[in-house]
Image: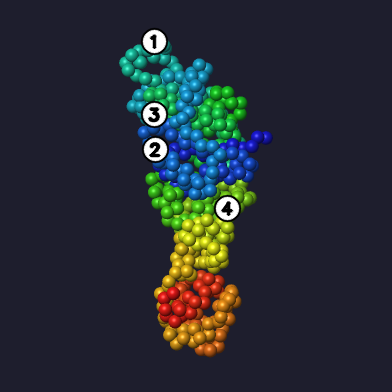
Amino acid sequence: MSLPVVRFAPSPTGRIHIGNTRPALLNVLFARAAGGRFVLRFDDTDAERSRPEYAESIEADLHWLGIRPDLVVRQSDRTALYGEATERLKRSGRLYPAYETAEELDRRRKRLQARGLPPVYDRAALALSAEQRAALEAEGRRPHWRFRLDDGIVFWDDLVRGPSSIDCASLSDPVLVRQDGSFLYTLPSVVDDIDLGITHVIRGEDHVTNTAVQIQLFAALGRAASPAFAHHNLLVTASGEGLSKRSGALSVGALRDAGIEALAVAAMAVLTGSSAALRPVTSLEDLATGFDLRQLSRTPARFDEAELQALSAKTLHGLPFAAVADRLALFGIVGDKAEPFWDAVRGNLAHFAEAAEWWGVVEDMVQPLVEDEALLERAAALLPPEPWTADTWGAWTAAVRTDTGRKGRSLFHPLRLALTGRDAGPDLKSLLPLIGRARASARIAGIPA
């Protein structure tokens, strides 16, 4: 069996949101699990709405999520292939010209619906003679081109939904080429899947009805077997509303700017609406462990922003130093202190940027807060000599407790305020050795240090 080749095919007409990351990640994880290839294909044949800056932002968002395509293609560069396929379909009689206007088609649909009939195109264009077509064109009409479907039921074994079928009698012959010669989604997509050797099409369930048409189109263009199909459930908001590119707050860029961890977005996009438990992950490889497409539910996957925030924090808490060293370096957090610092503070972070604030507490001048001057005087006198270790905090506070009789909050809170200038924070057992004796001595004396 050949290695899988999959694709993610966004239209660069806006910024992608967390719902778009679901098919992207499912495709990537599926390919990686089997050593296959992942293709990023920009469906940019809509020249009016497609923008290079959106394509760039999509690539940047995928890169942030840890997705590195093996190949990037743009449909706008491949129109010659679609033209060749169009001519082949015309010669075989599977693509035929139709001249109805949008208004005429709308009236026909309404008449059928009024009679309780499905609004399926009646193939009236197939009955036109050459003379009638010439007369219509002489009037200034230009044809759109429809793909003639074969009768019968199309079956496929969906990797998410199981055995699936669509009766083509319930479908209109789809328009593949508009009057102006531009291509609709279906033809370029199938031509690309053939040319790029796509073996599995993993996409949202809103594409299920396209599958029968595409399977027939694969055969009409000479591909003996169509790719395997998998149609996953869609992410919706907690209230059940669908996501769209207009959901600016849920765009990948907005989530990144809000300090949400990329791995939390990935875990949320993949595991929500599946039988697998939602959990923090340390890498995409970790996310792929044990995951299978058949774990996805058939019902919409409800996405909760509050749950994402909590998952993001939990993700941070579990990340080892090696996973964040480069990011810490951007804040100037380097050297021998960097790893013990991360281990000390990560459990208290809601967002990664807060690490820089705590590095400031360790390294920069802090204005101590004096809550109990008498206690701090005795604590200063009992401050042990260096070197300091993780045991220093316990030994020091035990000595202060014995000397002053203070315990609990009345002991620990004044020390924390003086040492960090904060009311709460990381365990001082780990933080104190990083602050060091010189700074600690000055701070408990009420001197900024």
Q: Secondary structure at mark 4?
A: loop
- Give neighbour class at mark 2: few <14, some 14-19, many 20+ (Cα, 10 Å): some
Placement of 414 over or under 123, stated as above or below: below
- Per the rendering, the mark at residue 283 is 4
Amino acid type, label 4:
Ser
- Per the rendering, the mark at residue 131 is 1
Q: Secondary structure at mark 2?
A: loop
Nearer to me, 204 or 344:
344
Q: Secondary structure at mark 1?
A: helix
Alpha carbon distance from label 3 to label 1: 27 Å
Amino acid type, label 1:
Glu
Assess whether mark 1 and mark 4 are in contact (beta carbons under 8 angstroms). no
Residue visible at 45% across and 17% down in the picture: 126
Residue visible at 41% across and 20% down in the picture: 98
- Per the rendering, the mark at residue 67 is none
The residue at which mark 3 appears reads as 109
Of marks 4 and 3, the one in the foreground: 4
